[in-house]
């Protein structure tokens, strides 16, 4: 069973940086991918970045060049380094693990970008 806990969110000024962490306390067996999603008020949840077992990385166009996703080899921890943050990056950020056809989610961490 996968259990995910995000941390590292908070309030930051435009242009600032934050690093989110996702701790996976479950069994990493058969994980296909880990990723970060976000959901802003009144909007649907959207993919931010994901990394697969073959270390292939996909970024949403709106974060390319600003965010960096990484993970440890054991699938126990995943990070999202966020640079040059913009007010439109304000959202709840969720950690996701895909194992086969099963998706697991963390509880989310709030990121607010405001002056």
Image (spheres, rainbow, N blue to C red):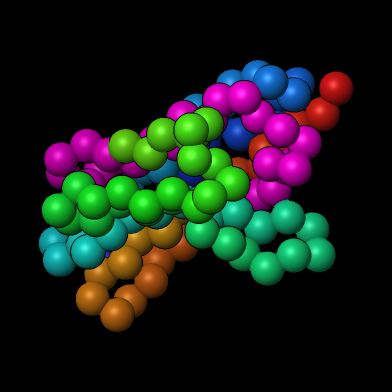
The picture places residue 5, in percent across and down from the top left corner, at: 45, 47
Residue 71 location (% of width, % of height) = 28, 39
User: Is residue 37 depicted above or below 70 in this figure?
Assistant: below
Q: Give left or right: position of 39 versus 94.
A: right
The residue positioned farthest toward the bottom in the image shown: 101
x then y, percent, for residue 52: 24, 55
User: Which residue occupies the foreground of this view, 58 or 21?
Assistant: 58
Residue that sits furthest to the right in the current view: 115
Q: Is residue 101 left or right of residue 88?
A: left
Decide which of 38, 67 is in the foreground and name it. Answer: 67
Residue 29, compared with residue 11, is above or below; it is below
Asked where in the image residue 100 lies, by quadrant, the reply is bottom left
What is the number of callouts on the image? 0
Highlighted magenta segment, given as a residue range: 71-93
Whole-percent x, y for residue 46 in the image:
58, 62
Whether residue 60 can be seen here: yes
Instruction: Give the residue at x 74% y 65%.
Output: 43
Horizontal side of residue 56 vs 63, given as left or right: left
User: Taking the image as drawn, is residue 94 in sight?
Assistant: no
């Amino acid at each position: 069973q996968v259990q995910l806990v995000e941390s590292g969110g908070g309030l930051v000024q435009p242009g600032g940086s934050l690093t989110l962490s996702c701790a996976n306390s479950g069994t990493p067996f058969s994980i296909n991918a880990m990723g970060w999603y976000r959901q802003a008020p009144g909007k649907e949840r959207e993919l931010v970045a994901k990394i697969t077992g073959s270390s292939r990385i996909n970024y949403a166009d709106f974060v390319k060049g600003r965010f960096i996703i990484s993970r440890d080899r054991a699938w126990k921890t995943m990070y999202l380094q966020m640079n040059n943050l913009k007010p439109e990056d304000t959202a709840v950020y969720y950690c996701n693990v895909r194992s086969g056809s099963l998706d697991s989610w963390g509880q989310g961490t709030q990121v607010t970008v405001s002056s």
